[in-house]
């Protein structure tokens, strides 16, 4: 069900944002609004995205695989590595060969090309999901403390650096979640997943509640930043405000996808 929901969500995002004139207009406005962001923020975004290379991706795959091997869990290792690899195969195939971007509004340069789904967001989210798969339950909270903020920031950074549109990030969240959910379903079918019966860890509960609140606030803030200006000014709403709303939605999308997958693994070792 989670896998199906992820794919459907990505499809709906594509239809609304790419195949409609209103969707393209709003997202292009957000890109122009990013020009008004602070230079330090833009530089930080470029630096963070620049660190995601073929070599860093390979290092992440090796690290994930190493955790699984040290646990002597080859099934988890295959599933986790598969999430990262398959995630990239799917999004790159969709972006390069399957999904068109019709010219519904006037635009020039790189913005005329399709950039959905975001490969960088997919990398960040699939690395997070792969870590959830291979890291033991008792250490999952520690992993989340470090990896979840990074994965969430990457999605927003793609907007700040103007590498991607909001729809690119949201579609990547949905596809990454779907691929990871299929991996978990495969593990369940194999009988590889066992419930954890140990004590609940208060620190992890606090962490999950904290990020749930941040997700809710980000979603509400995005709705406010888009809702009122678009209702009053239509598609001519202030580009800076539209950009800020897009950033809030990007953060909320990544957090909701991460928390959804984490909920699927609740008390599973």
Image: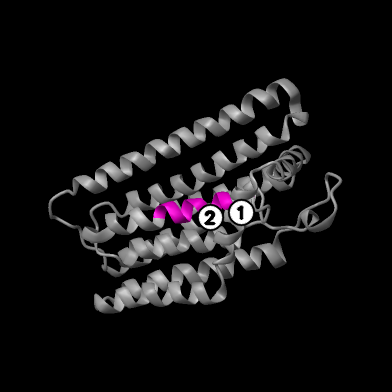
Residue 26, horizontal then vertical, whole percent = 72, 38
Residue 53, horizontal then vertical, whole percent = 56, 71
Q: Is residue 87 left or right of residue 212?
A: right
Vertical placement of residue 63 versus 261, above or below: below
Residue 188, horizontal then vertical, whole percent = 31, 63
Q: Categorize mark 2 by other alpha carbons within 10 Å: few (<14), some (14-19), many (20+).
A: many
Residue 76, horizontal then vertical, whole percent = 32, 71
Give the residue number, with chain letter if any, for mark 2: 154
Residue at 74 percent across and 40 percent down: it is 29
Residue at 48 percent across and 77 percent down: it is 58
Q: Is residue 33 left or right of residue 145?
A: right
Q: Regarding mark 1 in the picture, which secondary structure is present there?
A: helix
Q: Is residue 158 magenta?
A: yes
Query: CA separation, marks 2 and 1?
Result: 6 Å
Total numbered circles: 2
Quarter of the view holding residue 194: bottom left
The residue segment tinted magenta is 148-159
Which residue, as the protein is rendered here, is positioned at the far front? 40
Residue at 38 percent across and 36 percent down: it is 213
Q: Regarding mark 2 in the picture, which secondary structure is present there?
A: helix
Q: Categorize mark 1 by other alpha carbons within 10 Å: few (<14), some (14-19), many (20+).
A: many
Disc number at residue 158?
1
Question: What is the basis of the colouring in this image?
Answer: one colour
Q: Is residue 129 left or right of residue 165?
A: left
Query: Which quadrant would the C terminus be assigned to in this image?
Result: bottom left
């Amino acid at each position: 069900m989670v896998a199906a929901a992820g794919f459907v969500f990505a499809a709906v995002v594509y239809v609304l944002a790419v195949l409609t004139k209103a969707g393209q207009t709003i997202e292009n406005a957000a890109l122009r609004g990013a020009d008004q962001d602070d230079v330090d923020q833009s530089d930080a975004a470029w630096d963070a995205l620049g660190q995601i290379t073929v070599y860093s991706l390979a290092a992440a795959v090796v690290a994930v695989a190493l955790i699984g091997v040290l646990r002597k869990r080859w099934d988890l290792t295959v599933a986790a590595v598969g999430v990262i690899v398959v995630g990239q195969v799917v999004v790159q195939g969709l972006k390069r060969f399957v999904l068109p971007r019709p010219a519904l509004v006037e635009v020039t340069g790189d913005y005329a090309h399709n950039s959905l789904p975001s490969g960088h967001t997919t990398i960040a989210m699939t690395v997070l999901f792969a870590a959830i798969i291979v890291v033991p339950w008792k250490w999952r909270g520690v992993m989340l403390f470090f990896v979840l903020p990074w994965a969430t920031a990457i999605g927003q950074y793609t907007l700040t650096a103007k590498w991607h549109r909001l729809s690119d990030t949201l579609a990547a969240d949905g596809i990454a979640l779907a691929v990871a959910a299929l991996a978990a379903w495969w593990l369940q079918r194999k009988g590889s997943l066992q419930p954890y019966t140990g004590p609940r860890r208060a620190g992890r509960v606090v962490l999950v509640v904290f990020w749930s609140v941040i997700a809710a606030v980000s979603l509400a803030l995005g709705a406010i930043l888009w809702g009122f200006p678009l209702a009053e000014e239509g598609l001519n709403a202030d580009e800076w405000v539209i950009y800020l709303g897009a950033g809030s939605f990007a953060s909320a999308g990544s957090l909701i996808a991460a928390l959804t997958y984490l909920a699927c693994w609740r008390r599973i070792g």
